[in-house]
Amino acid sequence: MRLKSNLYKDNYGNIFFSKTIQGERIVLPTHTKNPGTANKLHAVLEYHALKQFYDPKPKIKHIGFSKLVTKFLNEKHDWTPKTRETYEYVLKTYAKTTCLPENKATADGFKRRVNVVLNWGKKNGYSTDIKKYIIGKTVPRHRVFHAKELDIILNKFENREFQRFVQFAYYTGARRGEIHHLKEDQIMGNRMQVFGKTGERYIKLNEQAKKVLKKQEPLWQYKTDFISKTFKKNCRRLGIMNARFHDLRRTFGLNLIKNGMPIFQVSKLIGHTTVKTTEQHYAPLLIDDIEDFII
């Protein structure tokens, strides 16, 4: 079979498409040795040749990582205020030192956000001296508080205002970043409007949560680092080791499931985007509750 114009074979029988546009020759492989197949690809190859000529890839510009971060942050992103705050803190901190935090989980968070910037830079024609990180699989944390620990945490902290904040976090299952800067207009009777990891959502307020709110005026205005450090410090003082503030939320969800609440309702309450996410979080925690069985 005769090849169409612009198609030719090399010495090994491989067929290529060649087209000269305004004095520039563009050669594209057909990835076939079959003339019939190559002829069928002719129109597609001509389109790609024209596209390559008139819409060339941007030239790569090498810039420092700090400048790349500035360009990235100045772009419009579909972020919540909390997400923007996190990106700005992580990227500006890393740009100053190019060092990672000692804590593995925190370091992985830095790595992921640095990689996001590098991917954005590559897509937009920028390169820098920083290389992408290879991130290992994070081991899921399954720490929950048993009944005695939870009773101590909810009742034995020295600072009563912070104690109420801890109680409110547990009774709502809210994330730390969703309630650390609460405003009066976010409280709407039996529900609360929050902005966090998954954007805007509404949390149902039970009687326990509303009772705490009545005792707290004005509402809490804490920095997230203060919450984490104060919580750990109080737990250690009371003999509760390996405790993190987020463990309250995990305990809240687990106790709801153990008390018989359907998992789709638990998923809605704690703000997971899908029920599958909730199942992945809590399935490992419920293994010990499965009754003995014989097959």
Image (spheres, rainbow, N blue to C red):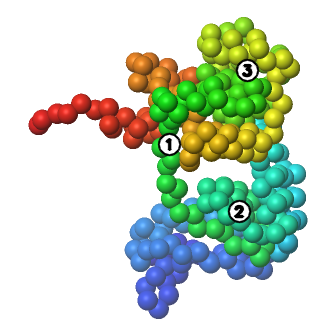
Q: Amino acid at mark 2?
A: Pro
Query: At x 72% / y 32%, what residue is drawn?
Result: 158
Residues under labels 1 and 2: Cα distance? 22 Å
- Quadrant housing residue 64: bottom right
Tell me the element at label 3: strand
Q: Is 32 or 187 nearer to us in this picture?
A: 187
Q: Amino acid at mark 1?
A: Arg
Identity of the residue furthest to the left in this view: 295
Residue placed under numbered mark 1 in the picture: 143
Image location (x, y in percent) of residue 266: 50, 23
Discs 3/2, front? 2
Query: At x 85% / y 72%, what residue is drawn?
Result: 63
Q: Earlier in the sequence, mark 1 or mark 3?
A: 1
Discs 1/3, front? 1
Image location (x, y in percent) of residue 220: 81, 27
* Badge 2: residue crowd in 10 Å (few <14, some 14–19, many ≥20): few
85 is higher (above) or lower (below) than 56: above
Residue 101, labelled with which disc?
Answer: 2
Residue 193, labelled with which disc?
Answer: 3
Residues under labels 1 and 3: Cα distance? 28 Å
Query: At x 88% / y 58%, what residue is drawn?
Result: 70
* Badge 1: residue crowd in 10 Å (few <14, some 14–19, many ≥20): some
* Badge 3: residue crowd in 10 Å (few <14, some 14–19, many ≥20): some
Q: Earlier in the sequence, mark 1 or mark 2?
A: 2
Q: Could you tell me if residue 28 is visible in this image?
A: yes
